Image: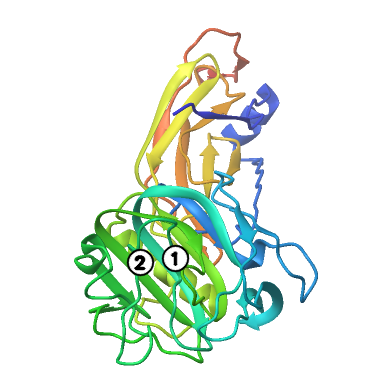
Amino acid sequence: MKAKKTSLQMKTSPIQAALKYFAIAALALAVSTTAQAQLPVTSGLVLRMDASQIVTNDGAVLSTWLDTSGLANNAVRQAASSAGYPQYVTNVVNGLPVVRFNATANNKGDYFQFTRITTIRTVFWVVKATANGKFLLGDNSSYDFHRGYDGTYLNKIWDSRYAHANIQNGTTKLMGNAVDGTATVLPSGSFQLVSVVTTGNVNADQINQDRIYNGSWVGDIAEILIYNRALTGAEELQVGSYLADKYGLSTAYPAATAPATPTGVSATPVSSGVVSVDWTASVGATGYNVSVSNTVTTATQVLTDNAPPLSVTGLNNGTRYEFAVQATNSLGASNYSATVSATPALGSAKNVLTFVFPGLPSATIS
């Protein structure tokens, strides 16, 4: 990965060095920022339908639901034969908006279609059903996400006959608790956090409809996340905690916390006046503070994404610098990592100051 570059302007004058050397004064520079809440796991994210990212008026009928995964796989509204349409409604769950599907129960309402994804491995939903069953995700030609009958309606999370074996044999969770999706009813009337990590690839290209059949999802959808890889147990917990916190849901997921202290920190001189600082990314971090110091100056460089390394430029060649890394997210900051050091290669002129005192050895500061 190409290192990010930043100039910290760490060069120091001979006078500054002398002041520090004789304990008269010190120079300090601090730069800080507040990290914004962000989805903690984005690797493999191929579709994100997030109602809180929609910009329109309360009550507006949506023609397109923009994908905010970065892949621009936007979902386009498809007109159906019966009354019912997707509507943007503000301040519904924890102060956040939803997309409300308001078709009459058992009738086919308008739905969204996106480019077919054939490599789905992990999905999260934040939803509230207000009528019986029907489909959260569907496909034009397959029924991988088929809901299951509870005797009258399609209220069970998965159907034991028609849902894809990779879903049936995967790990389904309801409010953070592992459940048998083919035997568990999705509660109606309150927001639920549902997830599945499959045992293999499954398909989808529709929200709110299964193939071409009547019967649409009736209720609210706040967010859908689709990944093309099976998240690890730790990653699944991170995303579940993030969604529970975001939507104010009481779940079995652990409370979202500040990220762990970064590990694997290293500092390597790469060219004149430049050191590359690298580390192992902390799960749940949305930003990093990188402390850079020598005997006279301390600076904190802010890295606002989840992607080390960081190239620190503007350093004095021949000067030893110390580096430490702190991870941040919306809930706080970790401790700083253990300090590592590096000295940029010689190759440019240095500031040199020599002090001579009667009866004492000379002292040279560079």
Image location (x, y in percent) of residue 6: 61, 31
Look at the picture and state if 285 lies above or below 236: above
The quadrant in which residue 199 appears is bottom left
Q: Secondary structure at mark 1?
A: strand
Q: Identify which residue, 82 or 37, lies in the foreground.
A: 82
Q: CA distance from mark 1 to mark 2?
A: 6 Å
Looking at the image, do the residues carrying marks 1 and 2 touch, with CB atoms under 8 Å apart?
yes
Q: At 43% from the left edge and 83% from the top edge, which residue is drawn?
A: 133
Image location (x, y in percent) of residue 256: 44, 71
Residue 93 as seen in the image, left or right of residue 320: right
The quadrant in which residue 14 appears is top right
Q: Identify which residue, 98 or 149, lies in the foreground.
A: 149
Q: At 63% from the left edge and 81% from the top edge, which residue is drawn?
A: 102
| Image mark for residue 145 | 2
Q: Identify which residue, 277 or 69, lies in the foreground.
A: 69
**Badge 1 amino acid:** Leu
Residue 141 shows up from this direction: yes
Residue 252 as seen in the image, left or right of residue 164: right
Q: Secondary structure at mark 2?
A: loop
